Image (cartoon, grey):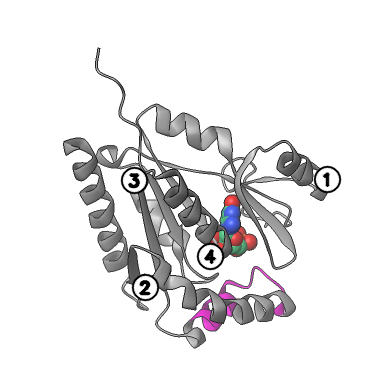
Amino acid sequence: MNKQKKGILFLLTGPSGVGKKTIWQPLINLPELKLVFSVSCTTRNKRPNEIEGVDYFFKTKEEFEKMIKNNGLLEYATYANNYYGTPKSFVDQVRKEGKNILLELEPQGGLNIIKMFKENKDSNFVSIFIAPENIDVLKERLLERSTESIDVITQRIKQAEWEIQQATAYQHMIINKTGCQKETTDTLYNIIIDAIRKNKSK
Ligand code: 5GP
């Protein structure tokens, strides 16, 4: 019997407001990509349009800290005064079944994942950084989205300056130009399908 090939982990990172979710979402149901989104845990408040277990698993600080203590997270970070983290067992299970997993993280978590895969010498890993054209575009998007208070938006913009500098640690960088979202999604599709083909021929 053929041994099931382990799926690829795709790491997608970029500053808040760059449009990560809008870029990857059209790719989730494409059968050729066998791509599963890793739903994260967070302690931030649920937004009105968000669904528990689809957008996030919403946790209290105590619940989240228990997961950290029990080694239940692949990575986690504190971002804008809240915890965000990736449940470990789900990622392992999806990859074991030969499906590919997509992690959408802020850059601190992204760097932790890059370090982890380097140390483990796991080559079934692709890192992609989504960058904005400039900081002003991010600010405009966050204000337009209006899901956070002005204080939180200011905090996110401040953090974005450091975040954008982390792009060089990634295998791929895509600039999400205003009005060119389809182009960005197509570029991401090509990166993913290329890695899948390479993995098949290994
Ligand atoms: P938001 O509050 O806007 O949903 O997310 C804030 C930031 O946290 C985004 O950049 C998002 O990609 C990131 N994020 C979401 N889930 C995780 C996670 O599990 N770990 C880390 N490190 N960042 C995450």
- Look at the image and give the residue range highlighted in magenta: 138-150
Look at 20% across and 37% down and name the residue there: 202
What secondary structure prevails in the magenta region?
helix
* Residue under numbered circle 2: 176
Q: Is residue 143 magenta?
A: yes
- Is 47 on the left-hand or right-hand side of 28? right
Tag 2: amino acid: Asn
The residue carrying pointer 3 sits among few (fewer than 14), some (14 to 19) or many (20 or more) residues within 10 Å by Cα, namely: few
Which of the two marks, 3 or 1, is nearer to us in this view?
Answer: 3
Q: Residue at x 60, y 80 (%)?
A: 157
Residue 128 position in % (x across, y down)? 38, 61
Nearest-to-viewer mark from 4 and 2: 4
Q: For residue 197, which quarter of the picture?
A: top left
| Label 1 near ligand 1 (CB < 8 Å) | no
The residues bearing labels 2 and 1 have C-alpha atoms spaced at a distance of 37 Å
Disc 3 target residue: 123
Distance from Cα at disc 1 to Cα at disc 4: 24 Å
Q: Between marks 3 and 1, how big is the CA–CA gap? A: 35 Å
